[in-house]
Amino acid sequence: MTVITVALGDRSYPIVIEAGVLDRAADHLAPLARGRTLAIVTDENVRGHAERLQAVLAAADVRSETIVLPPGEQTKSWTQLAALCDRLLDLGIERGDHVIALGGGVIGDLVGFACAILKRGCRFVQIPTSLLAQVDSSVGGKTAINTRAGKNLIGAFHQPSLVLIDPALLDTLPAREVRAGYAEVVKYGLIDDPAFFDWCEAHGAALIAGDPAARDQAIAHAVAAKARIVAADEHETNGTRALLNLGHTFGHALEAEAGFSQALLHGEAVAAGCALAFAFSAEQGIAPAADAARVAAHLRAIGLPDGLAAAGIGASGATLVDHMRHDKKMAAGTLPFLLARGIGRTYLDRTVDLDTVAAFLDRQAR
Ligand code: GLY
């Protein structure tokens, strides 16, 4: 078992990483339940895990109720948020109660936001079931829903009380979802940890194939990095947490062009976005071309898109940059970009000219 703390003063919380921890969840959750009923919120795709959790809790005399929502990004909506808040109020949830978010990023983001606003804030626990949620979205307290104006535009920072990560849950995750989540793993090496990128090159394929040792090591390493970054910049104000957005500005434009559909998963867009951020940095003479080539080669080897064509995007640079102009990070007409001086040397650049980006993307498409 690995326990990592997100150090945020009196809002600090532990992240417990242990294969099989779902079956021992009562040890962690009974003290938080304090004799009251725990609400478990999950989705149709992983309701089997919720049934297992309910059985484990019942065996420890902890009462629970499960709320099952439809799977998919469209569940992060005003409609589902309102319905979930009403259900939780019907269950009599109080401020001191803990709601369990058992699912991928969609469930974590929606439940976290509901708990941020329910009775002006109640507690919640994240039990992430996808690799992407285990290494990124379940840690750090970003919660949100989508609106017709864009993704994650309505939300709050609201930290969980506990994160329970069971890497064994990934055994039943579709391979495509595992690969997509891996993009958020390799990102930590690209940001500031070249030795971890070396590790990814050596062990990434084994991780994708389900090797438990590689998987556990990568999750623990990624979560430790995320916890350190969140503790340094909880509300993304001093430039540290923004580094986690590597690949996301390019990636967001690709996702928007693909209509935020199953045609391009978020992690796949992030992978292509990381390759594009390195290719752009190399073209601008900021990063060695060899580093950009190494990043693209690793993503290709894993089966992730390494650029526009592999992501199935044929749009012009102008069209893609237009998507970027709607990014919520736009400030005073400029968009901060995460560029890199090399592998493990990512930095925030506020001087990038969007016309230059458009011309670069047109060259990439050829
Ligand atoms: N997923 C990026 C962050 O938590 O800041």
Image: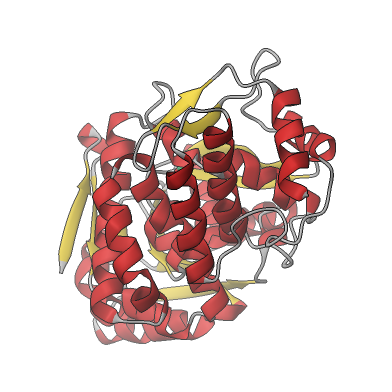
Image position of 328 with respect to 313: above or below: above
Image quadrant where residue 248 sits: top right
Tell me the residue at 52%/45% (across/down).
143
Image position of 276 with respect to 69: above or below: above
Image position of 68 with respect to 90: above or below: below
Q: Is residue 343 left or right of residue 34?
A: right
Image position of 216 with respect to 252: above or below: below
Label total for image: 0
Residue 260 seen in the figure: yes
Q: Position of residue 322 (x, y in %)?
A: 81, 33
Q: Position of residue 18 (x, y in %)?
A: 23, 72
Image quadrant where residue 271 sits: bottom right
- Closer-to-camera residue (360/134): 360
Q: Which residue is outermost to the top?
A: 332
- Closer-to-camera residue (264/339): 339
Tell me the residue at 43%/67% (across/down).
131
Q: Is residue 20 left or right of residue 311?
A: left
Q: Position of residue 339 (x, y in %)?
A: 50, 32
Q: Position of residue 168 (x, y in %)?
A: 33, 80
- Closer-to-camera residue (255/129): 255
Tell me the residue at 43%/45% (across/down).
291
Model colouring:
secondary structure
Tell me the residue at 34%/41% (across/down).
344
Image quadrant where residue 11 sits: top left
Quadrant of the frame with the N terminus: bottom left
Residue 100 seen in the figure: no
Q: Is residue 15 left or right of residue 191?
A: left
